[in-house]
Image (cartoon, rainbow, N blue to C red):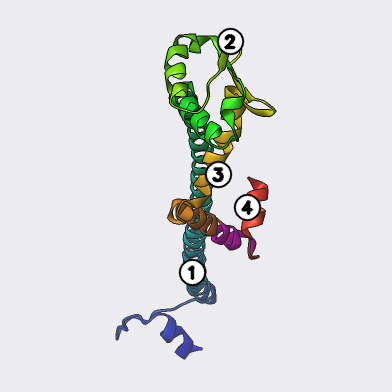
Amino acid sequence: MLDTIRSLDELPADDTDTVHISRRELVTARRCRALERQAQRRARELLDEAQGQVEAIQEAAFAEGYGQGLVQAAVDLARGLCESQRLAGQLHRQMAEAVRQLLKHLLDDPRWFDEMLEHWLAEQVDPPQMTLQVLLPQRCRRRVAVLREQLAQTAVTSVTFEFSEQERYVVRLGEQLFEFELEPAREQLAPRVLSQLAALPDSVRELDEQARHALARLVTTFTGNPATLQEIDDED
């Protein structure tokens, strides 16, 4: 027991004085040392726990930030794709209107009728034997003299002119009939002109396709399942 006491607390010895340590003091000293060790152990545990929490918070924050970044990227990409499609639709409508206006401008020019009439008469058999009947819009009344001069250079010897409030051209030679209305003609010709857009190079649609594939990859990141472009189109 004396060895234990000495190991706990070495006190200086004096030749004339003897140090006495009571049992209560010994127990108290042991308890203090035990409490100290327990406090140190608990402090280490709390430190390790705090460090673990800090690392967990950092990992969660990183994961959350990464996830939010992916979400934002997907949102931005989807918005860009929708905006691209909206602009493409708007451009198509503008081009359709431009084509209709162009056709209107071209068909309002009476010279096209002069050329068509000349080609049509060239295909007829024995036109001099019959009277050529021509129905024109009212706005073409002033062109009768020009048309008569043009027809005088052909084999036609007899021609009559009539006029209508409608934008309608009718030419009759015996049983042969040539008829043309401006508005229906514009509506029929416009889709044919616009159909030529299909012949544009693939590079025109390349950006749109790249955006679709990138969005599909982002969706795969969230779901773990490959997303097809058809699914993305359905969601749009």
Point 48% across, 52% down: residue: 205
Marks 3 and 2: CB-CB under 8 Å? no
Q: Nearer the viewer, residue 108 or 57?
A: 108
Residue 160: mark: none
Determine which residue is flagged by label 1: 48
As measured in the structure, the alpha-carbon distance from the residue carrying label 1 to the one carrying label 2 is 101 Å
Label 3 crowd bin: few (<14), some (14–19), many (20+), radius 10 Å: few
As measured in the structure, the alpha-carbon distance from the residue carrying label 1 to the one carrying label 3 is 71 Å
Residue 232: mark: 4
Point 47% across, 13% down: residue: 144
Question: Disc 2 or 4, which lies upstream in sequence?
Answer: 2
Span colored in magenta: 216-223
Nearer to us: label 1 or label 2: 2
Q: Measured along the vertical axis of the image, is residue 115 above or below residue 165? A: below
Nearer to us: label 4 or label 3: 3
Point 61% across, 57% down: residue: 229
As measured in the structure, the alpha-carbon distance from the residue carrying label 4 to the one carrying label 3 is 26 Å
Is 231 part of what is drawn in magenta? no
**Amino acid marked by disc 1:** Asp
Determine which residue is flagged by label 2: 163
